[in-house]
């Protein structure tokens, strides 16, 4: 997906050009909830939240020079290793929404993003996604350190985002009455 300069095009999407500065927080992607996104319950379908988060992620990745140009030029990219989504409020047809992204942590091979979808009119948070990306050499299909030409920009963005509070929902896990208090990998190794 190439991020280009347009303002609320036919499908209600706002996209940007690749940029060197990384706002704090990053809020450069917005769109409208489309008719095809509405499910039998009369609200945005669960699968489409993932699409919106992904489009916000593409905007943030392009701004960090990790977009399609990087993939083509460097034969490296980022792969999702783990993601968690929380849903806070319904979204309905034609709602204008935006994705807010902050960089939670970065190391030589990982990029941890926290994304939130907000309703533009009410400023209410509709959903949140925590996602861990691994930097991958696309020739070997193995995890590899970020290349020097992007490492400094990623580090600068992470440093700027350190001033933002860690969202209260980051690091959560699904807990039910059947969830053991000790992780299963520890229980399984006990005698």
Image: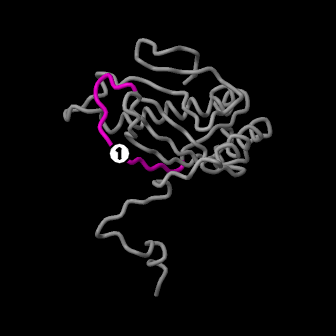
Q: Residue at x 79, y 35 (%)?
A: 149
Across and down, in percent, residue 53 comes to: 46, 36
Residue under label 1, please give it.
87
Q: Residue at x 49, y 30 (%)?
A: 55
Magenta region, residue range: 81-96
Q: What secondary structure is found at the residue carrying circle 1?
A: strand
Neighbour tally class for label 1: few under 14, some 14-19, many 20 plus, Cα within 10 Å:
some
Across and down, in percent, residue 129 comes to: 46, 45
**Going by the image, does 170 lie left or right of 41?**
right
**Going by the image, does 78 lie left or right of 93?**
right
**Going by the image, does 15 lie left or right of 158?**
left
> Relative to 182, does residue 48 appear above or below in the rendering?
above
Q: Residue at x 41, y 29 (%)?
A: 120
Q: Residue at x 26, y 33 (%)?
A: 43
Across and down, in percent, residue 184 comes to: 43, 72
Q: Quadrant of residue 128?
A: top left
Return the residue nearer the eye: 122 or 170: 122
Magenta stretch containing residue 65, yes or no? no
Magenta stretch containing residue 92, yes or no? yes
């Amino acid at each position: 997906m190439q991020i280009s300069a347009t303002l609320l095009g036919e499908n209600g999407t706002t996209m940007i050009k690749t940029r060197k500065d990384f706002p704090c927080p990053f809020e450069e992607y917005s769109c409208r909830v489309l008719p095809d996104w509405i499910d039998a319950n009369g609200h945005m379908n669960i699968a489409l939240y993932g699409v919106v988060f992904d489009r916000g992620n593409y905007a943030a990745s392009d701004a960090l020079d990790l977009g399609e140009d990087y993939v083509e030029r460097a034969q490296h990219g980022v792969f999702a290793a783990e993601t968690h989504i929380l849903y806070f409020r319904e979204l309905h047809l034609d709602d204008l929404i935006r994705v807010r992204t902050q960089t939670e942590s970065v190391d030589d091979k990982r990029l941890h993003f926290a994304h939130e979808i907000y309703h533009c009119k009410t400023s209410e948070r509709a959903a949140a996604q925590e996602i861990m990306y691994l930097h991958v050499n696309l020739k070997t299909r193995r995890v590899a350190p970020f290349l020097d030409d992007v490492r400094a920009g990623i580090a600068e963005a992470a440093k700027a985002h350190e001033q933002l509070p860690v969202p209260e929902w980051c690091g959560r896990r699904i807990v039910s009455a059947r969830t053991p208090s000790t992780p299963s990998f520890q229980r399984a190794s006990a005698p």
